[in-house]
Image (cartoon, rainbow, N blue to C red):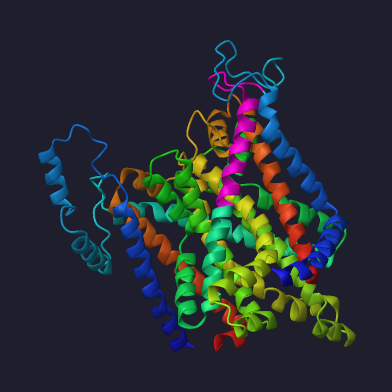
Amino acid sequence: MLSYILRRLAGLLPTLIIIVTVSFLILRLAPGGPFDQEQTLSPAVRANLERLYGLDRPLAVQYLGYLRALAHGDFGPSLRSRDFSVGELIRQGVPVSATLGLSALALALLCGIPAGIGAALWRGRAADWLVSASSALGLALPSFVVGPLLVLIFALTLHWLPAGGWEGGSLRYLLLPAVTLALPVAAALARLTRASLLESLRAPYVRSARARGLGSARVLLRHALPPALLPVVSYLGPAVAFVITGSLVVETVFGLPGTGRYLVQGAIDRDYPLVMGMIVVYAVLTLLLNFLADLAYGWLDPGVRHG
Amino acid sequence: MAEAAVAIPGLWRAAGRRLRAQRAAPLAALGLAVLVGLALLGPALSPHRYDGLDWQHLAQPPGSLAAHWLGTDRLGRDLYVRALHGLRLSLLVSALASAVSLVIGIAYGAIAGFAGGRTDGLMMRGVDVLYSLPYLFIVIILTSLMPRGSLAVLLLALGAVGWLTSARIVRGQTLALKRREFIEAARALGVRPLTILVRHVIPNLLGPVIVYATLTVPQMILFESFLSFLGLGVQEPRASLGSLVALGAQEMSSAPWMLLVPATLLVLLLLCLNVLGDGLRDALDPREC
C-alpha cells in the first residue's frame, strides 16, 4: 500500500512540471510586460528594473532559474506589490481561501448526501420531487448570481448578516460565502447519491439481503449504501477542483482577502511570479486532493487498487 | 454514411418519443424557444437601443415608466433592451464556443482513438494533464492576457477548455466503433484510414456527441457570463448577462432590479438548457430510465 502511494505521488511530479512549463510559456509569450502601465518610466529605469528582476535574460535561463528557486520553495518577489514576496502574499491569503473552501465542502457533503438518500428512499414522493427540483435549481444558479442575491436578501433587506468582509473568519462572515460556494456542489452530490442509490437498491444482493429478512435500516446502511457511495467519492475530485475555482468567484463577490484576487489582478498586471505562484499552489492542491479522492476510492473498492 | 442513414432514424424516433413522454423536458424546450425568440426579436419591439442614454430617466425601477418596460440603469439605459441584448450575446458566444470545442474534441478524440497504440496513449495523456489543471484559471489567464473585449479571444479561450471532455467521449466511442464489422469491411476493401475516419467513424459518433453538446452549451454560458462578471469578457457599452449581473451587484442596495432582471434571465436560460440536456440524455440512453 505504501509503495503504491509513493509511486502515485511520484507520478504527480511530471504533471506538475508540465503545468509549470506550459503556464510559464503562455504567460511570457503573451504581449505586454509588468512595467507597461507606468508611463513615466524612462527607458533607463525600465531597463534597470528588468535587470533587477532578471527579465532581460534569455527565457530559457529565466525558466531554469524559476524551476530551481521553486524546488527550494522560493516563489520569487512580486513585481507589483514591491514590499512583499509572492510567498508572503500566498501565506496571507491561503488561510482565508482554505477556511472558505473546506467549510463549503463540509456543508455540501452534510446537506447533499442525506438529501440524495432521502430522495432515493422516498422515490416519487414529495420529498423526492423537492430534492430533484432544488438540485436542478442549485445546478442552474451560478455563484455570482447566488452570492449577490443572498446579500440582497440577508444583508441589505433583513439585516441579519454582514454583506461582505472577513473579520478573521467568524461564523457570521463565513456563512453567506460558504453557502454560496456549497450550493452547486450539494446539488450535484444530492443528484449523484440519489441516482446511484436507486440503482443499488435494485441490485440482486440488496434484494437477497431483504429476502433474508434483514431490517430496512440494516439493508440500507450495510448493503445498499456503501457501493452507492463509490461514484460519490469519485466525484469528490472534480468537486474539490470546482470549489477551488469557485472560491475565486465567491471571494470576488464578498470581497474576501483570499488568494483568488491575486490571479486575475496578477495576470492583468503581468506580475509573472505572482501568477505563477498561484498556479503552482492551485495545481498542487488540485493534484493532491484528486489523489486523495483516488485513494479513498481504492480503500472503498479494493479491486481498483491493483487494477 | 449508408450505415448511419439506416441505423439512426429508428433510434432518433424512439428517443423523440421518450423525450416527449417526459414531464420537464418539453417544458424546458418551450421555455428555451421563448427565450431564443425574445433574444432575437425582443430588442426590436422597443424603440430604445442597448447603448442609448436617456438623461431624463436615470435609475428608474420597472413599471414606473411607460417608455422603459423594465426600468433603466444609472446611465438611463433601457434595461429591457440591454438584458435581451445580453441574452442574445450570451447565446451567440456559447453556441459558437460549444461548436469550436466540439470540432476540436471530435477531431482530437477520433484521431487518438482511431490511431490507437502509442499515439493514443500520448494524446490522451496530454488530455489528462490538461484535465488536472483548474481549467477556469487557464481561461482567466488567457483572457486577461489578450486584448480586452475581443469576441474571438473569448471564443478561443472557451473552446480551448471545452474540448477535453468531448475528446474523451469521442475517443471511447471510436475505440468501440473501430472493432465493428463495417469498419473492418472498409479496411479490407482498401479504403484509406483518413477516408474511413471521415466517412464511417465520425458520422456514427454524432449521437452521443449531440447529447454532450446540449450539456456543453449551458457550461459555456456559465463561463462566458462568469468572465464578463470578472470584467474579462464582453466590454461596455455592450452587455452580456454576466456583465449586467456584475453591474447590478454593484448597484443592488439602491437599484435591486438592475440585479434581478439579468439574474432571472440567466437562471431561466440555464435551467431550461440543463433540464433539456438531462432529458435528451435520458431519452437517448434508455438504460437510465
Residue range in magenta is: B71-98
> Is most of the magenta stretch helix, strand or loop?
helix
- Quadrant in which the N terminus of chain B is drawn: bottom right
* Percent x, y of residue A133: 77, 52
Work out whether A202 lies above or below B134: below
Residue A54: x, y in percent? Answer: 16, 54
- Image height of B75 relative to A95, above or below: above
From the viewer's side, name the closer residue of A10 and B113: B113
Residue B92 is one of the magenta-drawn residues: yes
Q: Is residue B131 visible?
A: yes
**Number of callouts:** 0
Q: Residue furthest left?
A: A44
Which residue is outermost to the front?
B189
The quarter of the picture where residue B138 lies is bottom left
| Residue B64 falls left or right of residue A24 | right
Quarter location, residue B209: bottom right
The residue located at (58%, 59%) in the rendering is B102
Q: Which of the pair A245/B93 is nearer the observer?
A: B93
> In which quadrant of the rendered image does the C terminus of chain B lie?
bottom right
Q: Is residue A160 shown to the viewer in this render?
A: no
Q: Residue at the spot x=47%, y=51% of the render?
A: B157
Q: Quadrant of residue B79?
A: top right
Question: Looking at the picture, does residue A114 appear above or below residue B228?
Answer: below
Q: What residue lies at 85% left-to-right and 61% top-to-bottom?
A: B18
